[in-house]
Image: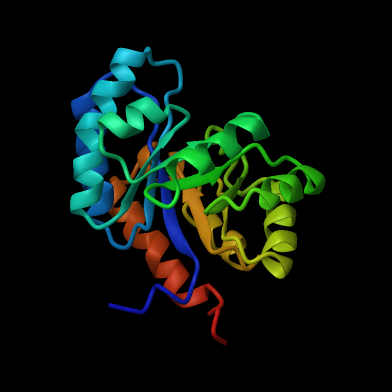
Amino acid sequence: MTDVENRCRLVLILPAGDDVQTLANQLRSALAGGDVATVIIPQYDRNDHAFQALAETVVPIIQAAGAAALVAGDSRVAGRAKADGLHVAGKKEELDDAIVKFTPKMIVGAGGATERHTALEIGELQPDYIFFGKFDGDIKPEPHPKNLALGEWWASMVEIPCIVMGGNDVASVVAVAETGAEFVALREAVFGGAQAAEHAVAEANRLLDEKAPRFDA
């Protein structure tokens, strides 16, 4: 096993879908493929009951694999499911409130940073990480150039870790890693491709092992 702590690591974004067991099986497959730092669970268009049921099913699976389980947007769902943290992509006031209420007991990360000024305002609140991109923004094989640029800028000057959304091709992890970002997020590249989720995660880790710059270099 290579040392993954000193290079860009993988974050998974759970996809949309109504069948909880299918999602759970896909997730188990993905987590069997190698190192995953975190799995973020978005609500998408699920109602609150369905979102709660999904979170309570997948959070233990994620935690059993040694990854952190983060619920996006709903602190009540996160608390009931005993998740490790909360992803907040709303207004700064919502993020500030979540940080005050839940840290350091829970991880509180931030999305919604679409340009530098907003990112710096978010950074002033000291979230545990900042996310560049949209969960469903992986519509092309490569990462969005704007997200790469924001990740490179942020990683070069701010100590708060950043996650950059990759593309729908596993190979996109390399472009994100080259920005200096601490984490690369994948969704369709793992859960929506022709190959099994386990193989996609294994390939992502192989590429990161071979090509990601080392933070202590």
Count of picture labels: 0
Q: Residue at x 37, y 58 (%)?
A: 37
- The quarter of the picture where residue 42 lies is top left
Decide which of 168, 161 is in the foreground and name it: 161
State the image coordinates of residue 155 (x, y, percent, origin top left). 67, 65
List the single residue furthest toward the right.
117
Q: Is residue 8 left or right of residue 84?
A: right
Decide which of 189, 90 is in the foreground and name it: 90
Q: Quadrant of the C terminus?
A: bottom right
Decide which of 70, 26 is in the foreground and name it: 70
- The quarter of the picture where residue 40 lies is top left
User: Is residue 164 at least partly visible in the picture?
Assistant: no
Q: Is residue 111 above or below residue 161?
A: above
- The quarter of the picture where residue 56 lies is top left
State the image coordinates of residue 141 (x, y, percent, origin top left). 57, 45
List the single residue furthest toward the bottom.
217
Colouring chosen for the image of the structure: rainbow
Q: Residue at x 39, y 32 (%)?
A: 15
Q: Is residue 103 left or right of residue 148?
A: left
Q: Is residue 29 above or below residue 26?
A: below
Q: Quadrant of the N terminus?
A: bottom left
State the image coordinates of residue 207 (x, y, percent, origin top left). 45, 68
State the image coordinates of residue 139 (x, y, percent, origin top left). 58, 35
Q: Residue at x 36, y 15 (%)?
A: 48
Q: Residue at x 20, y 44 (%)?
A: 61
Q: Is residue 215 above or below residue 45?
A: below
List the single residue furthest toward the front.
100
User: Is residue 198 at least partly visible in the picture?
Assistant: yes
